[in-house]
Image: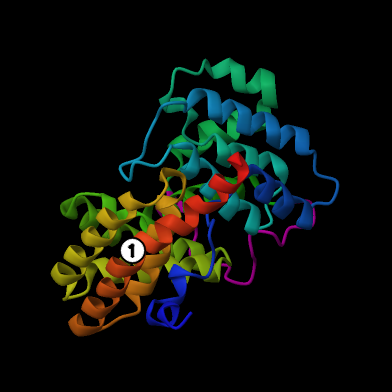
Amino acid sequence: MRRQRRFPPSLTARTDLTPTLESVVAEVRSHHPDADAGLLERAHAEASVWHAGQRRRSGDPYLTHCLAVAAIVAEARMPPSVVCAALLHDVEDTACPPQRIADQLGHEVADLIAAVRTAEVSAYPRAGRGTTLASDADGPSWETAVLAIRLADRLHNMRTIAFVAQTKQLLKARETLDVFAPAASAAGLEAVGRELEDLASAVLRPAASSYAVTGRLLAVLTLLLPSRQRARWQEEWTADLATLTTRRARTRFTLHVLFGAPRLSITLRRPFRRERR
């Protein structure tokens, strides 16, 4: 027990940080009690089919990204149709026939997906900080729903940016700081805006070279973990790393993770062993 105190809280706080369909449905129903779970289940099934076999740069199944984006949108109190579109926001990059989504989930979901592909976040007005994404009495406007999905997609990509080449990291971070973070704040998503700003600033800060090296090492360490959970632990470690302002602190943190990752890997796999008994 004493040894566990040597490691950062993120190593022992939770054993499964990956959003699941069940957790997304629960989040939606906490804000929309009459939400049709069947609609969300069908959207998840479609995402599972069309993204089958696809992997992110982290090695995680692509479906983990779809679920993460949907979870962020659900936390923003978006209605079920918007969460469904979030689950399928990248389906147009697959072999899925355009009409299939409309047939299976309705034209609203299909049209939202199409709109997300062409939306320009920079065109979103910077005024109106008094309204939030969930403040409309009749639900979010079309533009607000589309923006919510775009922001959620960018937020999850920024959480896992350590797996991207450094040149692209800098470009994405600058765009996030200049465009996405202000749009989130203006729309009333203050927490999302702050996290986007923090993640982007961590990449762009003067010590970015040291930070990038440490981030890449953490990315490599996640390969020790079960593939389904790598992205979420990378997010946790990256968020913790972003709060450290000195090279010495980052080095100590990395050493803690380095020695704790093997134990964490065993802990994460242990429940599956018990199920097979």
- The image quarter containing residue 247 is bottom left
Does residue 168 show up magenta in the picture?
Answer: no
- Can you say which quadrant of the picture contains the C terminus? top right
Residue at image location 29% in from the left, 69% down from the top: 259
**In this view, which residue lies farthest toward the front?**
277
Circle 1 — which element? helix
Closer to us: 75 or 107: 75
Q: From which residue to which does the magenta span run?
A: 121-139
> What is the three-letter code of the residue carrying label 1?
Asp
Vertical order, 58 against 98 (above or below): below
Residue beneath the point at 39% across and 30% down: 54
Residue 67 is left or right of residue 265, and the answer is: right
Q: Residue 212: percent from the left, percent from the top?
A: 19, 64
- Residue 193 position within the rendered picture, expressed as x and y whole percent measured from the top left: 47, 67
- Residue at 54% x, 34% y is 88
- Most prominent secondary structure in the magenta stretch? loop
State whether residue 137 is above or below residue 55.
Answer: below
Residue 122 within the magenta-colored segment of the rendering: yes
Residue 263 in sight in this render: yes
State the scheme by which the image is colored. Answer: rainbow
In the image, taking residue 207 as reference, residue 201 lies left or right, namely right
- Identify whether 130 is placed above or below 106: below
At which x and y percent is residue 39? 73, 33
Camera-nearest residue between 113 and 230: 230
Provide the residue designation for mark 1.
178
| Residue 231, horizontal then vertical, whole percent | 41, 52
